[in-house]
Amino acid sequence: MSKPPKLNLASIVAASAPATRGAPQTAEIVQLDRGAAPQKRGPATLKERARQMSVYLEPPVYDQLRDLAYAERTKMHAIMLEALDLLFKQRGARSIEQLSEHLPR
């Protein structure tokens, strides 16, 4: 028993097109209208604007940070930003708020 012929896109398109007598069946290439360029939205979300950075914490440090966030009913991310702000202040660098003032949104 022989193997069935392998299908290709041209044969599938030709088989699905209505049959016309005497004319060879060919596939037609259609160009899609992409329209105008997408419109700019309002300010991007933090996830779209920011750069991601991984931090590896020992389990007791992570647990303590999670417990603080839970007790203060906030997110660990907010506490990390507060810690960075304190570090910047201690080192004489600009705060996160000062750095954010110069960002184009």
Image (cartoon, rainbow, N blue to C red):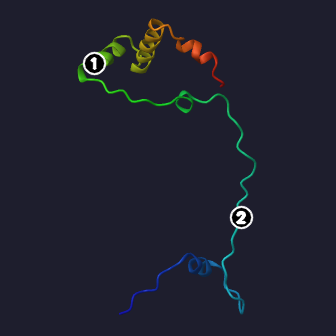
Q: Residue at x 56, y 13 (%)?
A: 97
- Mark 1 near mark 2, Cβ–Cβ under 8 Å? no
User: Which mark sits nearer the N-terminus, 1 or 2?
Assistant: 2
The amino acid pointed to by label 1 is Val
Left or right: 27 in relation to 1: right
Q: Nearer the viewer, residue 12 or 42?
A: 42
Q: Residue at x 39, y 19 (%)?
A: 76
Residue bearing the label numbered 2: 31
Name the image quarter holding the C terminus.
top right
Of marks 1 and 2, the one in the foreground? 1
Q: Mark 1 Cα within 10 Å, few/some/many (few <14, many 20+)?
A: few
Q: Residue at x 50, y 30 (%)?
A: 51
Residue 28, located in which quarter of the rendered image?
Answer: bottom right
The amino acid pointed to by label 2 is Gln
Q: Secondary structure at mark 2?
A: loop
Above/below status of 75 relative to 17: above
Above/below status of 60 relative to 40: above
Q: Position of residue 41 (x, y in %)?
A: 68, 34
Above/below status of 70 relative to 8: above
Q: Secondary structure at mark 1?
A: helix
Residue bearing the label numbered 1: 61
Q: Position of residue 57 (x, y in %)?
A: 30, 24
Q: Position of residue 62 (x, y in %)?
A: 29, 21
Left or right: 24 in relation to 98: right
Residue 101, located in which quarter of the rendered image?
Answer: top right
- Real-space CA distance between mark 1 and mark 2, rounded to the nearest whole angstrom: 57 Å
Residue positioned most to the left: 60
